[in-house]
Amino acid sequence: MENKPIYFKLFAHNIPVLGKERSAIYDLQKGEIVFIPNILFQIIQDLKQSSLAIVKNQYAPKQPELFDNYIDFLIKKDLGFKTKSPESFPEIDLSYQVPAGIYNAVIESDFEQYDISLAINSLDELLCRHLELRLQINGIEEDFLLQFFREINHKSFRSMVVFIEYRPELWQEDWAIKVFEACRKIEQLIIINCPISFKSDQYTDKIIYTTQSLDELSIYKKRYIVNINYFSEALHFNPFYNRKVCIDKEGNIKNDLRENHAWGNVEKDNLLKVIDSEEFKSIWEASPDKIEGLKDSPLRYCQFLPFQLSKNEHNTWSVVNENILQTAN
Amino acid sequence: MNIKGIETIFDDKLLAQLPPTYRYLVRIESSTFKEHFTGYRFSKSERHFSKNFINANAYKPLSEIVYQDIK
């Protein structure tokens, strides 16, 4: 039998990421992170090209047991394996492509200040996949609202989350169930600013009554999202802003509802043209590698990044409220 | 996948006649078994010419709000 050299490979879904002080291995299948020292990151990079024996001799010629400990650690954590034919295990494809002009949209409306159906129809044309609606329905007839949701049921969205401001008649659960059943795209119907919090008996976790307001829900909390879609998007784009559009209560088109700057208005401007402009799309490119204070973190490709950003020179970005970044790190 | 219990799903009399591996069959809640599509919602999409357009959740939060935090 041919005496081939032994190689070590990480499973294709385990991706090492270099940080400033320590590194991490993203297990994109289990959705887990394993921290490693930077030296182990370098060893893993070298093991892509060279056999175990060569790399061991390079890093620990006098103390090979130290090197073996690192490899045993990776095998025990089920992160990699030894093989004599590394060419049989190619790297995973981490390119990011979405068959939609807009992936997600957030629309605020009180049904008075602009025609919401203009925005919905444009997003349908863009094959927008996910929609978050934030509605105030003061003075809106039940039939009008049910008809509005029935029409959305034929659009191209794959899921919707609807926030509705509390009104006393919404306290009757039948009303919320009617809305939920009128539009089967609704994955969650959340009634905010309620006197007490509770969940629907019939649709637990789908229809939620909460005392919390949108401002309370918007407070930043540290979150990590470990999956291959998020990871591959974060390699090239900013996952929070990329392929996203927001429309505020007055119909203004924004990258994020919390921003003051608007790129147009759905009543006056063509949403498709605004979204296609380089200025609007500029922030989509603010990948974690380009954000000051974040680019050295080993967790930059899994961190939830709902930060307001400002553009610097040399195509880099800064977080407007730097204190929030300290919370995040 | 939600495993309901690891006890055998057959009665002892039947189990005696079956190969030993049948003792390890477990009961799984069908709503947690993706291929059954139970618990999924289906809508429509005119652009996709579909009357059974399956809902799918996003792989990331849609806005600054994380829905799992809502109490």
Image (cartoon, rainbow, N blue to C red):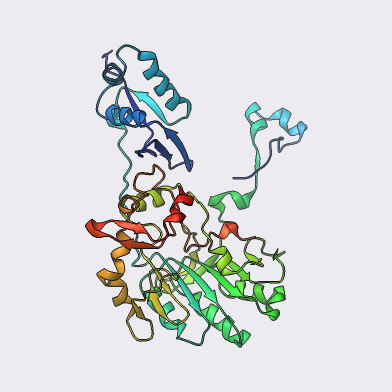
Q: Residue furthest front?
A: A323
Of residues A87 and A307, the one nearer the viewer is A307
Which x, y percent locates residue A59? 30, 20
Q: Is residue A100 above or below residue A13?
A: below
Which x, y percent locates residue A112? 51, 87
Relative to residue A262, is residue A159 drawn left or right?
right
The answer to whether residue A184 is visible is no
- Where residue A29 sits, quadrant-wise, is top left
Residue located 65% across and 26% down the image: B20
- Where residue A259 sits, quadrant-wise, is bottom left
Of residues A193 and A318, the one nearer the viewer is A318
Q: Is residue B21 above or below residue A327?
A: above
Residue located 49% across and 60% down the image: B56
Residue located 30% across and 59% down the image: A285
Relative to residue B57, is residue A229 drawn left or right?
left
Residue located 41% across and 44% down the image: A299
Which x, y percent locates residue A235? 33, 50
- Count the labels in the image: 0
Of residues A201 and A191, the one nearer the viewer is A191
The answer to whether residue A39 is visible is yes
Q: Is residue A321 above or below residue A68?
A: below
Which x, y percent locates residue A305? 43, 56
Q: Residue furthest left?
A: A314
Q: Quadrant of the N terminus of chain A?
A: top left
